[in-house]
Image (tube, grey):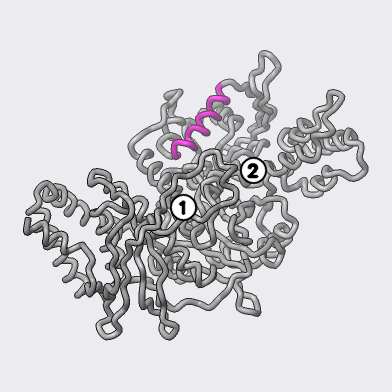
Amino acid sequence: MKAMEEEQDDFVPHLGREYQTLDEAWSAWRVYGGRIGFGVRLSYGHKSEKDGVITSKIFLCSCEGKRVADKRDYMTKRPRPETRTGCQVRLQIKLNRKTQKYKVVEFVSQHNHPLQPPGACYLIPKVDCNNGLRDVRKQAMKYGSAIAMTKYFAKRSLEDPSFKIFEDTTEEGEIANVVWTDAKMIVDYARFGDVVEFDTTFDINNEKGVFGLFVGFNHFREIVIFGSALMCDHTKESFEWVFTKFLEAHGSKKPITIFTTQDGAMGLALEKIMPDTRHGLCTWHIEQNCVKHLSCYNKDGMNIMGDFNACMYRYEEEKEFEDAFNALRRNVDVIVTWLDFIYGSKEKWAHCFMKDAYTMGMRSTQASESIKSDLKACKLDIHRFLEHFDRVLYENRDKEVKSEYNVTSKLPKLKWNVPILREARKLYTPKVFELFQAEFELSCSANIECLEVNTYTVVMCDIDNETPYKRGQVVWTREDQTVLCSCKKFEREGILCWHALKVLDREDIKVIPPRYVFNRWTKAAKDVIVVDVEGKRVIEDPLLDVRNRNDDLVHIITPICGKAAQNEEQAQFLRNELLAVRGKYEEKYENLSITSGDGDPTSEFHFTF
């Protein structure tokens, strides 16, 4: 009984009790609520105007207050249950300037509602943490979006030595545009930044800002993020600044090809900042615009959208395209149409013009759609959006970690036990191997004809005359083992086509010629060491050691906690020992800890968003 009383005295607040920090007081209030059986919330506090230090704070029961009446309540079919009862339970603390400790000056302990039973108390922290975080976010946003963002980026900079942030400010000192990259983005771009997609179709719901993502494919053909941007508008000047800073973050390395939406200002900015980079337009958005502008002309048996789709993907020769497009335009009996507008940028979307462009199979900005769908999960202000973006970013990177694990523990199935496929399975990542094996499968059904020395025509064996596969003309040179196909699949996607594989088989070549093993698709693609502009190696995951040390400590303490919790005396002993160790640790290392408190200096910027 005495031990129980001592334990209660340790977590029950009382007048005059002192806490070292606000965090300690808040943590104690949460523990108290969890033990007694009620949820907790943060209320308002006061901050000194002189030094910005919080001088007082009030902690509440989660049932405090009353829900504000909503005139639309009568329309609600499934109203939310009432959770506020006007409970007066509270804890108020004030800062003692002499001791620099927070002292309890008010404590009301009588609730006006039932408390949770002991068996249900473990459910309370899930609500407590969310409520507390919500109020903390509100407090952060009181300083303005720019201040909250500055704190966020300062925190990321402390965690990641390679983190880079660029801010574009107006003459009035307002932040207009922001670009940032972290270590993983820098490393991924160095290895896989040959083809990039830049998408700005995501708007931050509770702000006027535009969010932009630079993404691409890694060696697993999974989405990786190369950089992020917040923009105040879609002007040419904003795009120029964003592209310039993105390249600066990556040591001025420009992509070979970039895909964007059909934005005139963006196109002009790319011509100026990346004149040698091939610019492609997102075919998915073009198809959506086709439906919007041309669906009304689908009449009298015409298939306008099908004809346009053929112009986009089917024709190999430019003359075929021009003839088909002119016929399509004649069927649309309007003098000036969307067709005339899109025709002006045909080199950026039609297959016959893009077939020699290095795209890795990317033709649209839909590659980032899965990430955008995760970001659209809820309406957020800028500060909370950045936190949510971090979670989405880490979840996306976790997929790559799982793929790395699977590539060493699993092998894709061989459909044919032949040397070239066995070699390809050893070299390529699973997804790329499946693509290569599919090309080999097609080659097995193809016919080959020698036109002249070292030149072949390869066609698909077509019994029913219904094959969608197009013939290819292949030139083979044995001396340097080059195999060039008119379809240009290798130049476009980095894997050999079925035409070329048929010729290699005809020439009795049983392995992939080394020049046609594209390293960015292999399991060894990440073996390249990446250095920054100063020649320093970029550590891909700077927090990996931190997580490993944390896991090690948790692994040590968790079994002891589980065992001690079975006995009241043992639990109290372990708790006292842990508190003593925590005190010693804070006494020795508190001044060395990296923290970001409310008094941290921040830039006095304001957003134009």
Give how far across and how far down residue 605 sits, in percent: 56, 75
Of 14 and 527, which appears nearest the observer?
14
Q: On residue 363, which mark appears?
A: 2
Which residue sits at x=43%, y=29%?
A: 419
Which residue sits at x=53%, y=53%?
A: 69
Which residue sits at x=47%, y=51%?
A: 392
Badge 2 amino acid: Arg
Of the 4 image quadrants, the one containing the C terminus is bottom right
Kindly tell me whether residue 257 is visible in this rendering.
Answer: no
Q: Which residues are magenta?
A: 429-444
Q: Is residue 430 magenta?
A: yes
Depicted 575 relative to depicted 511: above or below = below
Depicted 54 relative to depicted 111: above or below = below
Give the secondary structure at mark 2: loop
Kindly tell me whether residue 320 is visible in this rendering.
Answer: yes
Mark earlier in primary sequence (2, 1):
2
- Quick one: label 2, few (<14), some, or many (20+) residues within 10 Å? many
Give how far across and how far down residue 553 sits, in percent: 21, 57
Give how far across and how far down residue 523 sits, in percent: 42, 43
Of 372 and 179, which appears nearest the observer?
372
Give the secondary structure at mark 1: helix
Compared across the picture, whether 12 is left or right of 487 comes to left
- Quick one: label 1, few (<14), some, or many (20+) residues within 10 Å? some
How would you classify the magenta stretch by its main secondary structure?
helix
Of 408 and 436, which appears nearest the observer?
408
Q: Are marks 2 and 1 in contact (CB under 8 Å)?
A: no
Which residue sits at x=11%, y=56%?
A: 4
Compared across the picture, whether 493 is left or right of 340 comes to left
Q: Quote the CA–CA distance across marks 2 and 1.
A: 23 Å
Q: Is residue 235 magenta?
A: no
Q: Which residue is mark 1?
A: 393
Q: Nearer the viewer, mark 2 or mark 1?
A: 1
